[in-house]
Amino acid sequence: MLIAQLSDPHVRPNGVLYQGVVDSNRGFADAIEHVLTLDARPDLVLITGDLVDEGRPDEYAMVRDILTALPIPYLVIPGNHDDRARLREAFSDHGYLPLRGPLHYCVDDHPVRIIGLDSTVPGQHHGHLDQAGLDWLADTLAQKPDKPTVLMLHHPPLVSGIPYLDEYRYFDESSLRGVVARFGNVEAVLCGHVHRPLVKRWAGTVLCTSPSTATQIDLKFAATAGPSSHDGPRGYLLHSWSDRDGLVSHMVQLGTFAGPYPFA
Ligand SMILES: [Fe+2]
């Protein structure tokens, strides 16, 4: 099974640039186009939050418009730039999304079970799951403790060391870690939010974040560093699952590069 993970497209209304400078709509469309040029077509696409930039209905209309180019089933979770109610409305044909409350769900139609978690806190930029969300996750994981499972949530439960990212990190990661660590079948925890590829051993599994299909957050560690980003390199993650080899995750960078060259 092949799973593409696109993240943080930050789609804007038609003709409007992200941050006034970047064509995030083009970036999202390019990523979808790249997924379709792979020599093995993914079975599923995961979009790990911040589908739009300001939670506006005209942005969600644009997301749906861009996604008409994607002939592969896809699942969405919200990020801090999404509006939960408007996202639900825009994807009302996505039967896996619950009709009320946080958008937690489980899709069990594939060799890998996919659990989507809604880590958003309305009106805030940090991430968190309340006790009801943690209980839902524990119950859902307990239903099939032997089936390979992937969790996805927008906010990675880690400290990146980049000060302006950590301000908006997942708060109280230890309670989430306590739930996930009880299960040995979680193959990976897939996140977005940080607009950078990060990997961490966490809760007995692998936690990884995807680059954004829009801008990439700059890598700076000084406490005084100010927030900044660049228009690239854009990318996405491609997760390959097999019973024999487990989950192997590739980072794909979008762009035009010289080659192909002989390889030996
Ligand atoms: Fe984002």
Image: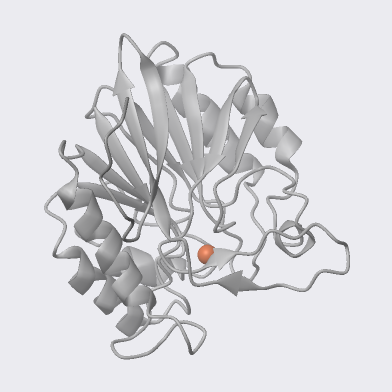
* Residue 93 visible (yes or no): yes
* Residue 148 visible (yes or no): no
Pick out the residue farthest to the right. 223
Q: In which quarter of the image is the N terminus?
A: top left
Which residue is painted at 16% across and 36% down in the image? 40
Looking at the image, residue 64 lies above or below residue 244: below
Which residue is painted at 29% across and 37% down in the image? 3
On the rendered structure, is 256 left or right of 158? left
Q: Nearer the viewer, residue 221 or 174?
A: 221
Looking at the image, residue 180 lies above or below residue 173: above
On the rendered structure, is 81 left or right of 203? left
On the rendered structure, is 122 left or right of 34? right
Expressed as whole percent of the image width and height from the top left, the position of residue 98 reads 35, 51
Q: In which quarter of the image is residue 31?
A: bottom left
Q: Quadrant of the C terminus?
A: top left
Q: Nearer the viewer, residue 17 or 99?
A: 17
